[in-house]
Amino acid sequence: MNLREIGEFGFIEELKKIYQYNNFDIIKGIGDDCAVFINEKNTAVLLTTDMLVENVHFEISTLSPKELGFKSLSVNLSDIAAMGGIPKNVLVSLAIPEKIDYEFLKDFYYGMDELINEYNMNLIGGDTNFSRSDLIINIVMTGEVEKDEVIYRNGAKINDKIFVTGYLGDSSLGLDVCLRKLKLDKYNENYFRNVHIKPKAQIKEGSVIAKSKLANSMIDISDGLASDLMHICCQSGVGAVIFENQIPYSEFMKNVFNQKNINPLDYALYGGEDFCLLFTVSPENKKKLCEIFQSHVNTNLFEIGEVIQGNRIELVDKSGDRKVLSKSGYRHF
Ligand code: ADP
Ligand code: MG
């Protein structure tokens, strides 16, 4: 069967059915942002891995080696943030083609060091291989969080309010800028390029939400709002409604939207790599969680919709009409 027929997420669902766990230390296997198991201190250990493939996830001509190192680590950090964890250890495996020289690799590691130092992490291993043409980066990361604070994708409840922790769409618009599909003035180009190239995972935000113990479900937005909200819905057995006029856009996005004929909604729903967090919270706990968040984190929370019965995502557009969203975000095949 062609992999396109089953799709990336269909393939993962198949794996989930096959591999069941009879080891009670494993709390979560396939299906969330990280696997979760319990260590001897009775703390939840998070384990995640992500691969970045040249010409699929990045193009060497569009970012520096240091930026590539930073981004490779951010992608993994974001999955730790999505479970409410604090990052601990990292392993880095590389398949290196001939065009990559020693200086490139040194700068790549300097880029990672910026985050390794910031979060006091340990780089504890990896693997080094030769590649025939493309650079391939695979990172494994561990994190920790108190057992009763982990937030999973599968806890969303009907009537929960849906929140995001940041602006949507800027990163995928930044990708269009990097790929020269979109031409803007230098000032705007720099902003969008930087958001795309140097994403900052929301570790503090995720941890504050987890410590509050008030959120019912959480995921990081890596594939676009539509796709990632669908993961929460599928895993929780619920549907969702989102309101177009509540989707948060940066001032930069609003400016570009006015200048050019661009629909920010497409970027928000189907673009990727915003790396902010999407979570759900009951109507009763919403106010308290917002207060806790605002007192610890210097950024805004945005309420964009609510959890409903069913298995689909509906969008209420600016004129109040409802339509069902197609779930496609970024797909590998
Ligand atoms: P994310 O976008 O948060 O990194 P993914 O969509 O890549 O998450 O993966 C979803 C789940 O499927 C995760 O639990 C991940 O570990 C698991 N998964 C993905 N690919 C594979 C694979 N090839 N084999 C086993 N599990 C996989
Ligand atoms: Mg994720």
Image (spheres, rainbow, N blue to C red):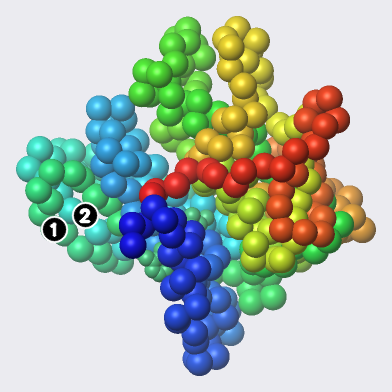
Q: Residue at x 35, y 41 (%)?
A: 57
- Residue beneath label 2, please? 94
Q: Residue furthest left?
A: 98
Q: Quadrant of ligand 1?
A: bottom left
Q: Residue at x 32, y 37 (%)?
A: 58
* Quadrant housing the N terminus: bottom left
Q: Position of residue 69 (x, y in %)?
A: 32, 44
Q: Residue furthest right?
A: 284
Q: Residue at x 9, y 48 (%)?
A: 132
Could you give the CA–CA distance between mark 2 and mark 1, rounded to whole angstroms? Answer: 6 Å
* Residue 49 in view of the camera: yes
Q: Secondary structure under badge 2? A: strand
Q: Position of residue 235 (x, y in %)?
A: 64, 66
Q: Amino acid at mark 2?
A: Leu
Q: Secondary structure under badge 1? A: strand
Q: Amino acid at mark 1?
A: Asn
Q: Depth check: 291 or 188 in front? A: 188
- Residue beneath label 1, please? 129
> What is the crowding at mark 2: few (fewer than 14 residues within 10 Å), some, or many (at least 20)?
some
Mark 2 or mark 1: which comes first in sequence? Answer: 2
Q: Position of residue 47 (x, y in %)?
A: 45, 69
